[in-house]
Image (cartoon, grey):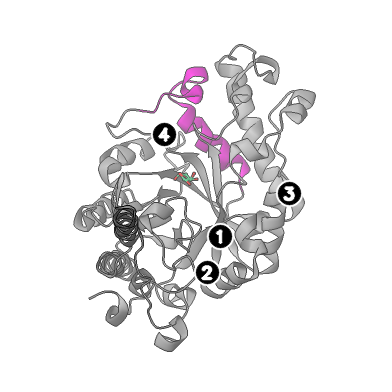
Amino acid sequence: MRRNIIICFICILAILLSGCSVEKVVLPAQKEVTDKTLKDVFKEHGMKIGTCVSSYVIDKKDTSDLILEQFNSVTMENAMKPDYILNQDKCKAEGKLVVEYNSEALSILKWAKKNNLSMRGHTLIWYSQTPEWIFREGFESNGSFVGREEMLSRMESFISSNFETLKNLGYIDCFYAYDIINEAIMEDGSLRQNHWTETIGDDYLWYAFYFADKYAPQTIDLYYNDYNEQYKAEYLVSIVNTLKDDTGRNLIDGIGLQAHLFTADDLTNYLSAVDTLAETGLKLELTEVDVGLGKYQSPLSATNEHLKEQGRYCYELINGLFERADSRKIKIDAITFWGFSDGFSWRKEYSPQLYDADLDPKYSLYGVLQIKEYSGY
Ligand code: GLA
């Protein structure tokens, strides 16, 4: 009886374990398949290719080597977000919003400059990862909310101090693009209500670009960045069309498409949203690409079949973008992936990146490199 219970227990355990573990899919190494790196392939289409970075990936030799070999642009995953660059005591002392980079941001800036990487700035005006005290009297955590004029002047000091700081530190020339506003529009086209709308009003968007245009050097393109762009394209067009000065000159240079996609997302719809956004005449950049297996809240496991589907998806997505760039249908300088390895992705449960957790190539890598034979076809 006892023996039967033990055998039964072992069988159940074996069934459970076999359901959880998926055998690793092994593809030939990148160097055996092609002598081109990601940045070689993108250069042929006039583009940079980027990844987001943290001090964790730049401090480790294997990940840092991979980034330097394959990519030529980086975005800080977190270290340049408002939460990380605004120091409450310093703002109280100076009576305005002043920027101070922390040690992670400084070490990434140093590393990027030393290695000749271009940089995207991300991000200044956002509803999330932004300290609430910046909206309050005296920069006190329990102060009441300030009025429109005070908040406009804080926004101006925040934006000017950011570009001034980068200039004084000697890094301003590393930047070619900056996300001035992140995620301001809802799926129904309404403006997201947040502390910026509460204190300033709906025209905070216009002022953000007005100040950025005033203080950023001409060499940095100013971007509006958002997610679910394929469902918001018409609304994004009508918002960016309002971002002009009184002579009709654009205060904005580009639209950032985050491109947090899933293999279940319709690619034809996605590329037609790209075409709609291109009609604004602004530059477009895919800024945070990852292609998750499955769909939102329903990840699929990393089986050979699912990874092949992801590889084909990446092949078609990048192919559609290369075709549009080559025929000048869209103006696009760069495509940035939100990471490069499934091991460090913020959406790791969806296995959304180009290399697996061991930094081995996936079909998705070969899809992006446009090598059809290994892209899962
Ligand atoms: C958004 C932001 C990014 C990042 C991701 C999650 O896409 O723009 O900065 O926070 O969410 O990692």
- Badge 4 local density, few (<14 within 10 Å), some, or many (20+)? many
Q: Is residue 213 part of the magenta span, yes or no?
A: yes
Visible residue check, residue 190: yes
Task: State the separation of the CA atoms marked 3 and 1.
Answer: 17 Å
The residues bearing labels 2 and 1 have C-alpha atoms spaced at a distance of 8 Å
Mark 3 and mark 2: Cα distance apart in space = 23 Å
Question: Residue 144, position in %: x, y?
Answer: 61, 11
Q: Are marks 2 and 1 in contact (CB under 8 Å)?
A: yes
The residue mark sitting in front, 3 or 1, is 3
- Kindly identify the amino acid type of the residue bearing the numbered disc 3: Ser
Q: Which disc is residue 103 wearing?
A: 3
Mark 1 sits on what residue? 74
Residue at point 49%, 70% (across, down): 359
Residue flagged by tag 2: what amino acid is it? Answer: Phe
Looking at the rendered structure, the secondary structure element under dot 3 is: helix
**Rounded to the nearest whole Å, what is the CA distance between mark 4 and mark 2?**
29 Å
Mark pair 4, 3: CA separation: 29 Å
Name which residue type carries label 4: Ala
